[in-house]
C-alpha cells in the first residue's frame, strides 16, 4: 500500500514538474533596443559628456567654445583657435548618464542618434574637417568619421577604418542641401572583430537623404573601449576657413540587449 502511495506521489510530482517546464517553455525573449543615454541640456549641461577638449593649447584665452545654448549644445571654432601647429579641435568625448560613464565594450551593439545643425560657415575643406568621430582612447585613429569634404564639390562623407588602418570613403551626398537646418543623424554598429558592422542614416525631416552599411570596418581595437566625439576638428591647411560652429541636440544612445 505504501509503495503504491509513493509511486502515485512520484507520478504527481513528475507531472507537476513537466507542467512547470511546459509553462516556462518557449523561446527566449528577443533582444530589444534599450535607451542608455538621453542627456538634457538644461539639466545635464556639459556633464552629459565624459570629457571636453576645449582649446587645450590655450590659444584663445578666456573663451569657452563648448556650451549649452537653449535646447542644444554649441561647439564654436574660430580661425585663431589651435590644437597643435596645423590643426584645431573643440570637441566633447564620451557619454555620461546619471554620473556614470557609458563604455562601448567588445561585442556590444549600439545605436547613436542626434540632430545636427551645420551652418554655411562650416565649410567642406580640401584637408579635413571632422564633425563626429568614433575613437578608442589612446589607440590610433578614428574607427569612423563624419566629415564634409571638398572634392570637386562639397560632399558629406563617412570615412571607415579597415584592419590595415586604411580608410574607405563612403560619400553620402551633397553637403550644401543639408546645411542651415536641423538634420537627423543615426549610426548603428557592433563593436566587434568578428561580425562587426556600421550602418548610417541621414534624414532631412522625414526624408532619408543617405543610408548605407558596411562590414569592412575595424570596430574593435583589443584595448579600452569605444567612445564617440562631437564638435569640430579641422586642419588649418585649407583655404577659406571661417569662424563657425556646430549645434547638436536630442542625443540618444541605445544598446541592443
Image: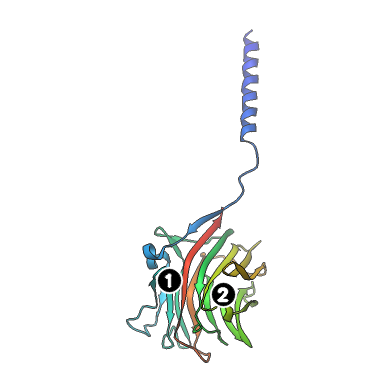
In the image, what residue occupies the spot 42% across and 68% down? 71
Q: How is the image coloured?
A: rainbow
> Does residue 184 show up?
yes
Q: Earlier in the sequence, mark 2 or mark 1?
A: 1
Q: Which is more foreground, mark 2 or mark 1?
A: 1
Which residue is label 2 attached to?
145
- Name the outermost residue toward the top: 1
In this rendering, the answer to whether 50 lies above or below 124 is above
How far apart in space, not on screen, are marks 2 and 1 (Cα)?
20 Å
Q: Quadrant of residue 17?
A: top right
In the image, what residue occupies the spot 63% across and 63% down? 196
Left or right of residue 63: residue 214: right
> Does residue 218 show up?
no
Asked whether 28 or 223 is in front, the reply is: 28
Which residue is label 1 attached to?
73
Marks 2/1 in contact by CB < 8 Å: the verdict is no
> Could you say which disc has been placed on residue 3 in the image?
none
- Name the outermost residue toward the front: 206
**Quadrant of the drawing holding the N terminus:** top right
Badge 2 crowding class, 10 Å Cα cut-off, few under 14, some 14 to 19, many 20 or more, is: many
In this rendering, the answer to whether 85 lies above or below 161 is below
In the rendered image, residue 117, in percent from the top left (x then y), is placed at: 50, 75
In the image, what residue occupies the spot 38% across and 63% down? 44
In the rendered image, residue 45, in percent from the top left (x then y), is placed at: 38, 66
In the rendered image, residue 149, in percent from the top left (x then y), is placed at: 58, 83
In the image, what residue occupies the spot 61% across and 62% down? 192
Q: Quadrant of residue 67?
A: bottom left
Element carrying mark 2: strand
In the rendered image, residue 106, in percent from the top left (x then y), is placed at: 57, 60
Badge 1 crowding class, 10 Å Cα cut-off, few under 14, some 14 to 19, many 20 or more, is: many
Element carrying mark 1: strand
Amino acid at each position: 500500500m505504501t509503495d503504491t502511495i509513493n509511486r502515485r506521489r512520484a507520478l504527481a510530482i513528475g507531472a507537476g514538474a513537466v507542467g512547470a517546464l511546459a509553462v516556462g517553455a518557449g523561446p527566449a525573449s528577443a533582444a530589444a533596443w534599450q535607451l542608455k543615454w538621453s542627456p538634457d541640456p538644461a539639466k545635464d549641461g556639459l556633464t552629459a559628456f565624459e570629457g571636453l577638449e576645449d582649446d587645450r593649447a590655450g590659444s584663445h584665452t578666456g573663451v569657452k567654445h563648448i556650451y549649452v545654448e537653449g535646447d542644444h549644445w554649441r561647439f564654436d571654432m574660430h580661425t585663431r583657435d589651435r590644437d597643435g601647429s596645423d590643426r584645431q579641435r573643440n570637441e566633447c568625448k564620451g557619454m555620461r548618464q546619471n554620473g556614470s560613464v557609458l563604455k562601448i565594450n567588445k561585442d556590444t551593439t549600439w545605436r547613436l542618434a542626434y540632430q545636427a545643425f551645420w551652418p554655411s560657415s562650416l565649410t567642406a575643406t580640401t584637408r579635413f574637417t571632422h564633425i563626429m568621430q568614433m575613437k578608442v582612447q589612446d589607440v590610433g585613429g578614428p574607427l569612423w568619421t563624419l566629415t564634409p569634404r571638398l572634392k570637386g564639390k562639397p560632399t558629406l562623407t563617412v570615412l571607415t577604418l579597415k584592419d590595415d588602418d586604411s580608410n574607405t570613403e563612403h560619400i553620402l551626398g551633397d553637403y550644401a542641401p543639408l546645411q542651415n537646418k536641423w538634420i537627423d543623424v543615426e549610426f548603428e554598429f557592433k563593436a566587434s572583430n568578428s561580425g562587426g558592422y556600421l550602418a548610417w542614416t541621414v534624414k532631412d525631416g522625414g526624408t532619408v537623404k543617405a543610408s548605407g552599411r558596411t562590414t569592412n570596418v575595424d570596430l574593435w581595437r583589443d584595448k579600452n573601449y569605444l567612445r564617440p566625439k562631437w564638435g569640430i576638428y579641422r586642419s588649418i591647411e585649407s583655404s577659406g576657413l571661417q569662424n563657425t560652429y556646430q549645434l547638436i541636440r536630442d542625443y540618444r544612445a541605445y544598446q541592443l540587449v
